Amino acid sequence: MEQTLYRVEHASSVWWPQMQLFSGLILSLFCVFAALCFFVMATQQTATTRLSNLALSVCLLSQACLSFLSVVASESISLMVYLLLNCVFVIAGLTAIYCYRSVLSRVLFGDSNQGLPQIQADQLTPELEATQKELEQEIEAANRMRQRMQSIFESAPNGMLVVRKDGTIAQANTLAESIFRYPEGGMVGLSVEGLVPKEHRPQHHVDRNNYVKAPTKRMMGDRKDLYGVCLDGHKVPVEIGLNPIEGSFDQEIVATIVDISERKQYQRFIESRNNELENSNRELQEFAFIASHDLREPLRKIIAFSRLLQGEDYGTFTAEGKEYSGYVVDAAERMRTLLDSLLSYSRVTSMANSFEKTDLNALIEEVCADLQLTLEESQAEITVSPLMSIEVDASQMRQVMQNLIGNAIKYRQPDQVPKIVISGEQQESKYLLTIQDNGIGFESEYAEQIFEVFKRLHGRDQYPGTGMGLAICRKIILRHQGRIWADSLKGEGSIFYIELPLIRQEERLNE
Amino acid sequence: MNDCIIMVDDDPEDIILVKTALKRIGLPVSFLSFPSGELLLDFIASQMSHSHREAVENRVDYLVLLDLNMPKMGGALCLSKLRKAQSFNQLPVVIFSTSDAHEDVERSYEMGANSYVYKPDNIKELEKIMNSIYHFWLFKKHRWLQI
């Protein structure tokens, strides 16, 4: 009945159906378009707004279908379909309204408290989430930093204590605990004064308070020997560095502790060794001096009384007796020369003079004057080039030159006039003296040995002497912190080199 | 009374040598010897107080031959003590030593030694030395008095 009425009504005018058809199509097209728009929006929105847009687009779509169907196939459409589409339209519409309730309420009732937090919560959630993440990251970083500091603190090669302003220990690493023989964690909370020997505690307290007032990075104890007291009362030698911790709440100080027991032990060992060496050195020198000095006495008696006996006032010797008594005196005299040279060898250090700037040319002239008789006898030619003035012990240097020039004449070629050439040359911080002769020379294998004590290359009957001359020369040059060496070819003369430093290091105190 | 040479030496052989040399030259001196400086000082002290009481013509002139290296009181200390005591400071002291070291010679003269003689190892030389010491320090005065 109703359907019929509807149709009748429509059919009552000619243009009405066309009009109705046209407007129905426009409406459905518009609804489809709007639904599409909301649908596209829905795909790009966040969860809350997506649902409302989706609902709107469904609502519009159902409206589009409804109007399209009512226009195009109003006769064939069943009531059920019509009602279903209407239901979908109403439900979707209500859903959209529900989703937009906050917007609607704001539009309808103005700004209400009810709606606002909802909106802010919606907007702030991502920010809050980000902040929370940041915070978590920071906490993790701080944890990692703390762990890192802890492992650095533990892995330090020294004992480390963190001490608060009031002197309590805030932190101690394992090494510090082992230096002071405390159990693990046993030091925290104790007073550092407990680690100081009893007699130094009051002073330490004062010093620590002063340090807290003006903390700087420095060593503790001003190079004095420091000792720490262990839990069991044992004292351990330590070296302590102090360092204020920048940015700590309680002006904490970190003390770096090194156990120097071993170092001390080595130091003591070296010192005692050094003392022993110095003593034995001194003893040797004294021994050489006293021996040579005191041994001369009995020798002098032997010589004196032998000569008295040889004088024939107290009985006469046979010819043989005279000869033999002569051997006694000769041997005793030879021994005395040996002792004399040993004495002068030991006097190089015991009777040393100070070093003074000396004109070497003048010094050599003096030596030549002393050797005048020998020089005239051998008709030796000495050529001396201009030399420098350098700091030497003049009397010892004279002894050296006298020995070397004397040797050059003593060991001359029998059929040649001895020629001696002395020259000098500055080499950076050193001065090289060269004494060259045309004497008999020696095999180069002896170049080092000739400087040894009592070393002789010739028999006593060939060349007299004790074999101490060059040994004394070397001792003197060594005392000057220089070097002496020789170069020779047998039969072609020899060259002696003396290298002297122009600037000497400080003389050793015991010299 | 003869003048007297006093030898202070811890070395008995040296004393014998000097005694022998004096005997061989035949000088008119008496000879005394002490093994240490302390004994010399004791002796001189007793003699000086003694000689004050004696007549001038009976007075004995002394000459001291003093060794340097001796145990306990050495020659140097003995000499300085002699020179400090007023009554002995005119006593001629000849240092008679085996040391030829410059320092010893210089120090001895600084402390007031009248002469320094190096001990010879030859009796002939020793005789010469004793002769000149005697004539310089002791004999000269006699001759001068005789003139």
Image (cartoon, coloured by chain):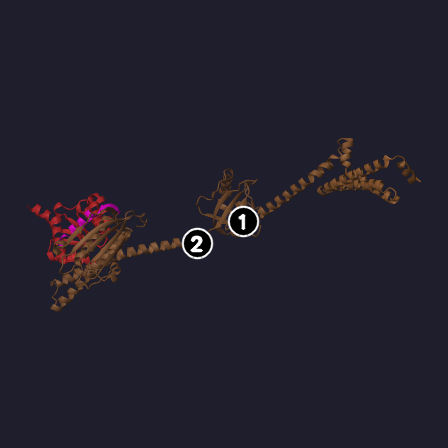
Chain colours: A brown, B red
Q: Residues within 10 Å of mark 2 (few under 14, many from 20)?
A: few
Q: Using the rendered image, report if marks 2 and 1 lie on a common chain.
A: yes
Q: Is residue A242 above or below residue A475?
A: above
Percent position (x, y) of residue A387? Answer: 21, 47
**Contact between labelled residues 1 and 2, with CB atoms less than 8 Å apart:** no
Mark 1 neighbour density, 10 Å: few (under 14) some (14–19) many (20 or more): few
Is residue A369 rendered magenta in the image? yes
Q: Outermost residue toward the left?
A: B147
- Does A25 appear in magenta? no
Most foreground residue, A367 or A8: A8
Quadrant containing the N terminus of chain A is top right
Pick the front one: A272 or A211: A211
Rounded to the nearest angstrom, the CA distance separating label 2 from label 1 is 29 Å
Please report, as a chain letter, where disc 2 is located.
Answer: A
Query: Of the residues shown, which amino acid type is indicated by label 1?
Result: Ile
Where residue B117 appears, x then y in whole percent? Answer: 17, 51
Taking the image as shown, residue A406 lies to the left or right of residue A508, namely: left
Secondary structure under the numbered disc 2 in the rendered image: helix
Which chain does the numbered disc 1 sit on? A
Range of the magenta residues? A354-373
The x and y percentages for residue A508 are: 32, 49
Residue B70 seen in the current view:
no
Mark nearer the N terminus (2 vs 1) = 1
Q: Relative to A184, is A74 on the left or the right? A: right
- The residue carrying mark 2 is A265
Write down the quadrant of residue A22 in the picture.
top right
For the stretch drawn in magenta, the main secondary structure is helix
Residue sitting at 58 percent across and 48 percent down? A147
Task: In this rendered view, identify the residue nearer to me: A114 or A396.
Answer: A114
Residue corresponding to mark 1: A152
Q: Residue furthest top?
A: A110
